[in-house]
Image (cartoon, rainbow, N blue to C red):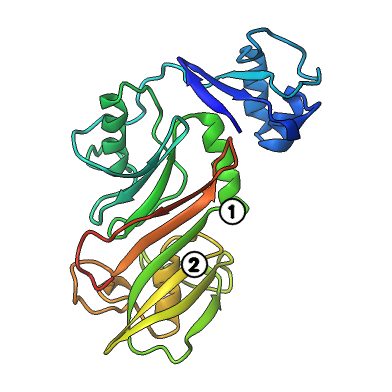
Amino acid sequence: MKTQKKGELFELVIPDKWKNVTIETILRNHWQAPKKLIHSLRMAGDIKVNGESISWTQPLSPGDTLQLHLFKEVEYDVPPTYGEIDVLFEDDHLIVINKPAGIDTHPNHQETDSLANLVAFHYQARGESCRVLHIHRLDHDTSGAIIFAKHPLSKAILDRLLTERQIKRTYRALVHGRLKQKKGTISEPIGRDRHHNTRRRVSPSGQDAVTHYKVLEYKNPYTLVEVQLDTGRTHQIRVHMSHIGHPLVGDILYGGKPIFKRQALHAARISFPHPLTGEWIECEADCADDVGL
């Protein structure tokens, strides 16, 4: 699918497979954009075809150029903070970053030392005016691949892809003990621990949570595992591995021993279809510190 950015416009050339589609069907069926966002685009007159405003129900032809006013001047929603980031993938619509351990994904209050602040500085240095829109989070002491969208349409589509489990996240974790099963699935609901503000626990009244794991290597007295998530509950991997008797090394909150300064958990790979073009994107993230991963 041929696309390009011209100033504040995103241009998409209608492919042969979209013969006789309309603006309405592209937004509602192909991209499945939220109704509120579609209404906003319509009211603002933000979509044209071949430079002209047309009816959203008029059939389009292969070769027509769909023009969307996506890249508007906006103020940064978090203050930019000088610093380097490890970019794994970036285009006009999203950025994937290898988050270091020891940093929050997004400021909780007025902090200026979160990953989002560094991303804002990265946009500023590139001369881009973008909101810092995270699609998912990683814990303060978890490193690895994380996605940010650059505009509301990209965020809306990526949010849906995450909900539909089309964004595949693969983690590496070092756990205590020797897992007897080479692979397995933990399907236990997770809820808040009423006795501890920051802890989560397996609870019959919690939210559904599904974690798949497989053994990569035995490192006595530890086991290196690869983990994939069907759901994204807070502390999910840490809670589930602790629940089966194999807490993460360094994760003192859930029974791990302080062998390292943090829990040995890293988001090593993320893959997903591009929100606007459908192109498959796959990113590998190296672990920057030595926690056995």
For residue 73, above or below residue 91 = above
Q: Residues within 10 Å of mark 2 (few under 14, many from 20)?
A: some
Residue 68 relative to residue 146: left or right: right
The residue type indicated by label 2 comes to Gln
Q: Going 76% across and 21% down the picture, which residue do you hit?
A: 61
* Image quadrant in which you'd find residue 134: top left
Of residues 2 and 203, the one drawn nearer to the viewer in this rendering: 2
The residue type indicated by label 1 comes to Gln
Residue 26 relative to residue 116: left or right: right
Query: CB atoms at circles 1 and 2 under 8 Å apart?
Result: no
Of mark 1 and mark 2, the one earlier in the sequence is 1
Name the quadrant of the N terminus. Answer: top right
Of residues 278 and 170, the one drawn nearer to the viewer in this rendering: 278
Q: Going 77% across and 13% down the picture, which residue do you hit?
A: 55
Q: Residues within 10 Å of mark 1 (few under 14, many from 20)?
A: some
> Considering the numbered disc 2 on the image, is that residue within a helix, a strand or a loop?
strand
Q: Going 42% across and 16% down the picture, which residue do you hit?
A: 73
Q: Position of residue 100 (x, y in %)?
A: 26, 53
For residue 102, above or below residue 211 = above
Q: Which residue is mark 2?
A: 228
Q: Which residue is mark 1?
A: 166
> Considering the numbered disc 1 on the image, is that residue within a helix, a strand or a loop?
loop
For residue 268, above or below residue 106 = below
Q: Position of residue 108 (x, y in %)?
A: 33, 43
Name the quadrant of the C terminus. Answer: bottom left
For residue 140, above or below residue 64 = below
